[in-house]
Image: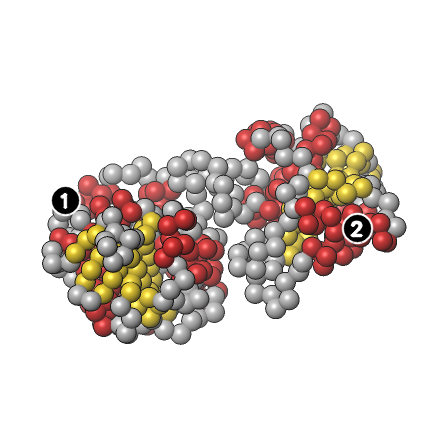
Amino acid sequence: MQISKKYYDFILDDSKVDILEGTTQAGKTTTAINTKFLYKVKTTKRTKHLIASESLGVLVSNILSTGDCGLLDNYPEIELYLNGSSEQKLPHLKIDDNTVYLVGYSDIARFKKVLGGQFGAVLIDEMNIADMSFIRELFLPRFEYCCGTLNPDNPDKEVYTDIINRCRPLDKYKDSVPKEIMEELNKSIEHKDWRYWYFTYDDNPSMTEELKNELLSSLLPGTLEYQTKIMGKRSKGTGQIMPITKANIITELQAKYIDIEKQIERKFKRFSFAVDTKYSVKSNDVFAMVFDGIDSNGKLITLEEKGFNNKGVKEPLSPSDMVIQIDEFFTYCCNKWGITNTIFIDCEDAGTISEMKKFKREHGRSYNVIESWKKLKILDRINLQNGWIKALNYLIVEHCINKINEHNNYCYDKDGKIPEHDTPDHFINADQYSWIPYKHEIGV
């Protein structure tokens, strides 16, 4: 097995966490598992270890038995118990006196059986697509050593902000890290003993010119796969789901006046207020509030927004806390722009809805508290909004930066599908709860 100088430095570096990011065919996982990971399995104090990949099938075919450079190809003496054994029911390897569990992080039920214990060495393949609850549980931490490998992905993913961007490269290799990625790393607080490595196919000695040319011609330039796997760039996706342009972003003055010079005020026929609720203390999910207006020309304008996040907060906000925030922001918006008598709240959050109704009774508020209506399918919502966006009937006041950012980052996944999890769409959701009851008034 051929190893480049940079990989030798990776193997010899005494770090607690190693993150290997870079292009495809760089040898990241292959080198890591056959060298440093195996060494850590044999030298850490604990005898239980972990290898995780997207699925058990992927783990076996891409990591253990590739046919030439898998762990079992190089070390046939390692015992594989894919269906478990009499001593251990879960899939695992036996390396001397060590047990290495094998899990697919897409199988939540199975990985939960493994988590909770303490591990010596951990290797996470394609860390960028792993379930974040799995990653967070491991990084409590539950290991003596961890190595994560990945191709670049959407830089706004939590795995970057929470883990990867806190790692740092050795000084001698800083210049080999793309400038854009280095800037992302420098935005985060450095974690001691967490090392970042950037590898490309040029760091793989087994890559001949013929193989390199074949690789470069295998994907269509401009696609997400080409950007991430060939160019090694972090990318938000090939296509935004609801892209907005500069023409869709207006100033507060433009929201108030149809003609600023002539001081012709914009007439609103309706205002609407809605809330999307997320109370997680572990994720970047946001509690989002949006105040919209529909003017006499059928233009939907997001006038105000406000958000909260419980992550890292010593005293997380509860539903009883949030209803105060909702009431205050609702009152602020109505005083500034105009009155609406309804607050729409995520229909799946019975706790906040109940607390809001209780608050209304105890404080004599006149507004209605109504559950959001979600029967309008996601695709139908998107199609409606894209039509309004194109016709400039969908506008956002420039200070609503969270909603603008969500539009910029809300992208199709690698399979061209609308993502269902870990998506930046909380303000978009609140906005939809706000306009769905009045969709017939927009664009007409």
Q: Is residue 228 left or right of residue 298?
A: left
Q: Is residue 136 left or right of residue 39?
A: right
Query: CA gap, disc 1 to disc 2?
Result: 71 Å
Q: Number of marks in the image?
A: 2
Which image quadrant is residue 167 in?
bottom left
Image: 431 above or below 364 = above
Question: How dense is the environment of label 1, judged by Cα within 10 Å: few (below 14), some, or many (20 and up)?
Answer: few
Q: Is residue 148 left or right of residue 30?
A: right
- Would residue 163 be seen by someone viewing this image from the given angle? yes
User: Residue 77 location, x and y as percent?
Assistant: 11, 58
Instruction: Please tell me whether mark 2 sits on a helix, a strand or a loop.
Output: helix
User: Residue 22 location, x and y as percent?
Assistant: 31, 55
Q: Which residue type does callout 2 highlight?
A: Lys
Instruction: Please tell me whether mark 1 sits on a helix, a strand or a loop.
Output: helix
Residue located beneath label 2 in the image: 358
Q: Nearer the viewer, residue 229 or 121?
A: 121
Indicate which disc, 1 or 2, sits on the residue closer to the N terminus. 1
Question: Could you tell me which residue is drawn at 72 percent across and 57 percent down?
Answer: 320
Picture disc at residue 210 = 1
Question: Could you tell me which residue is drawn at 42 percent across and 35 percent down?
Answer: 416
Image: 25 above or below 292 = below
Q: Nearer the viewer, residue 72 or 85?
A: 85
Residue positioned most to the right: 364
User: Residue 266 location, x and y as percent?
Assistant: 80, 38
Image depth: mark 1 or mark 2 in front: 2
Q: Which residue type does callout 1 highlight?
A: Glu
